[in-house]
Amino acid sequence: MMLPDLSLANAGAPTCALESFRRRIPVSARLAGVRLLVAFLSTLGCFVRAPGLNVSMAEGGTLISVDYEIFGKVQGVFFRKYTQTEGKKLGLVGWVQNTDEGTVQGQVQGPISKVRHMQEWLETKGSPKSHIDRASFSNEKVILKLDYSDFQIVK
């Protein structure tokens, strides 16, 4: 069975029969579908870059929220302050707090690429005097708007 040629020809136009179908779907609907697909695949740990769609459109337009808990020597080492600073530097919103179990927990919200960067920072870097054993991320979901206006330290 021959598959249609889905490669992009001059000016980015598809060379298959899907072109007439694509013309009937508004660009905004196609972009919404791509954003939904990117958000879904990102929850699986995948990174997708759709042809003809720049990264800022794919990731900057989709907001996500993720809860986290960090285990290790993360209390008494300015972990919350460094987390707040890193979150603000990335333009993210959310909160961070110490727990009674000796961990640090919180929630981070923002564009997918920025949240992914923050997750890596939480998992591997933290504050200079911290020692991270592991990081747990949960309740990841696509959101339509940010629930917070800043990144706060909760006492």
Image: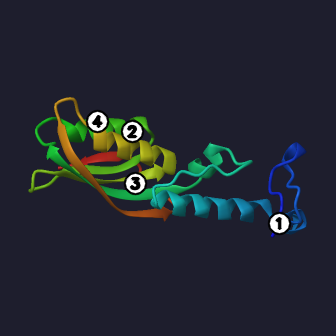
Q: Is residue 144 visible?
A: no
Give the CA separation, mark 4 to mark 3. 24 Å
The mark nearer the N terminus, 3 or 2, is 2
Of circles 3 and 2, which is in front? 2
Q: Residues within 10 Å of mark 3 (few under 14, many from 20)?
A: some
Give the CA separation, mark 2 to mark 4. 16 Å
Q: Which residue is mark 1?
A: 2
Give the CA separation, mark 4 to mark 1. 49 Å
The mark nearer the N terminus, 4 or 1, is 1
Q: Which mark is residue 125?
A: 4
Q: Is residue 141 visible?
A: yes
Give the CA separation, mark 3 to mark 1. 51 Å
Give the CA separation, mark 2 to mark 1. 51 Å
What's the residue type where badge 3 is placed? Tyr
Q: Which residue is mark 2?
A: 88
Residue 146: x %, y % from top left = 46, 56
Asked if residue 20 is positioned above or below residue 153 in the image, the reply reads below
What's the residue type where badge 4 is placed? Lys
The mark nearer the N terminus, 2 or 1, is 1
SS class of the residue under badge 1? Answer: loop
